[in-house]
């Protein structure tokens, strides 16, 4: 198996009014290409800090993070941005859609920063929206869509450029159980096509849907288990 993510002794320290806070404390693990894994932990456990580092939105205070064979500490900000744009798709709890843009335009948005021609990004965005079942809603604005539909637009945006990794941070947090199940089903379908999925959640019942579950408490990785009810990787 090919290792997509290698995290070795990652730490992240913040200095606040109350002193030093160790948001991550020696976290180490590997994610193979094509895996579906969940990172679960309570609010403040460090899981979002970890996602920001894995998504190249932040740097660790110490430790080593290798993505797609590249030691990210050695990359310039420009190389990090290019790698993030090419290889990583993000899905957030609050959807992060631009209100004045349609579903199609929101899905196209990241492709415009990657140099796609207008026709190429339009075709890729349409294909992504069709993949998440929103071909009939692509010209609607976010205010005209339900929460579940907005999250599907966010997912379409994440996959429109063909990333090798999806980082989904609490993607079901604002959804009712039915919509949440749809999003999880779509993530599984994407994983089945070869996309690596890392799902960050505070909800153990959501994490239980993943074949592998990593648990973070107080900045430490306290368990890393295979979910045999879902499948063995």
Image (cartoon, rainbow, N blue to C red):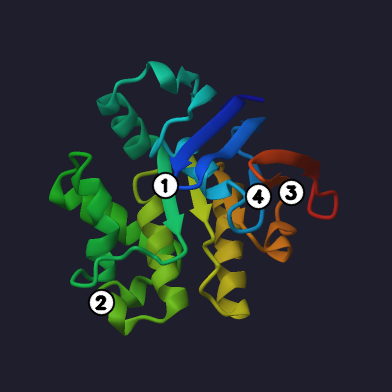
The disc label shown at residue 78, or none:
none
- At numbered mark 2, what does the secondary structure look like: helix, strand or loop? loop
Q: CA distance from mark 4 to mark 2?
A: 31 Å
Q: CA distance from mark 1 to mark 3?
A: 20 Å
Q: Earlier in the sequence, mark 4 or mark 2?
A: 4
Q: Is residue 86 above or below residue 131?
A: above
- At numbered mark 1, what does the secondary structure look like: helix, strand or loop? strand
The crowd level at tag 1 (other Cα within 10 Å; few <14, some 14-19, many 20+) is many
**Residue under pointer 1:** 89
Q: Is residue 150 above or below residue 9?
A: below
Q: Earlier in the sequence, mark 1 or mark 3?
A: 1
**Residue under pointer 3:** 211
Residue 117: give x, y in percent of width and height. 15, 45
For the residues bearing labels 1 and 3, Cβ distance under 8 angstroms: no
Left or right placement of residue 70 versus residue 104 in this view: right
The reply to whether residue 163 is in sight is no
Q: Is residue 1 above or below residue 15?
A: above
Q: CA distance from mark 4 to mark 3?
A: 8 Å
Tell which of 62 and 19 is nearer to you.
19
Residue 177: give x, y in percent of width and height. 62, 78
Tell which of 3 and 192 is nearer to you.
3
Name the quadrant containing residue 135. Answer: bottom left
- At numbered mark 3, what does the secondary structure look like: helix, strand or loop? loop
Q: Earlier in the sequence, mark 4 or mark 3?
A: 4
**Residue under pointer 2:** 141
**Residue under pointer 4:** 38
Name the quadrant containing residue 94. Answer: bottom left
Q: CA distance from mark 1 to mark 2?
A: 21 Å
The crowd level at tag 3 (other Cα within 10 Å; few <14, some 14-19, many 20+) is some
Farthest residue, direction right: 228
């Amino acid at each position: 198996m090919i290792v997509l993510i290698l995290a070795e002794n990652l730490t992240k320290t913040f200095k606040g009014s109350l002193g030093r806070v160790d948001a991550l404390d020696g976290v180490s693990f590997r994610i193979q290409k094509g895996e579906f894994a969940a990172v679960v932990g309570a609010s403040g456990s460090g899981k979002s800090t970890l996602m920001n580092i894995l998504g190249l939105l932040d740097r660790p205070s110490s430790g080593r993070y290798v993505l797609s064979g590249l030691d990210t500490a050695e990359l310039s900000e420009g190389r990090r941005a290019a790698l993030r744009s090419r290889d990583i798709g993000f899905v957030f709890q609050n959807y992060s859609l631009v209100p004045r843009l349609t579903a199609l335009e929101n899905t196209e948005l990241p492709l415009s920063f990657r140099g796609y021609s207008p026709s190429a990004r339009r075709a890729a965005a349409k294909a992504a929206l069709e993949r998440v079942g929103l071909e009939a809603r692509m010209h609607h604005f976010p205010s005209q869509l339900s929460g579940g539909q907005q999250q599907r637009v966010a997912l379409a945006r994440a996959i429109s450029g063909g990333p090798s990794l999806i980082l989904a941070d609490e993607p079901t947090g604002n959804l009712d159980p039915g919509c949440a199940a749809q999003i999880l089903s779509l993530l599984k379908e994407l994983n089945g096509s070869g996309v690596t999925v890392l799902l960050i959640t505070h909800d153990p019942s959501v994490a239980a849907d993943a074949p592998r579950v990593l648990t973070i408490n107080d900045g430490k990785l306290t368990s890393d288990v295979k979910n045999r009810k879902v499948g063995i990787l």
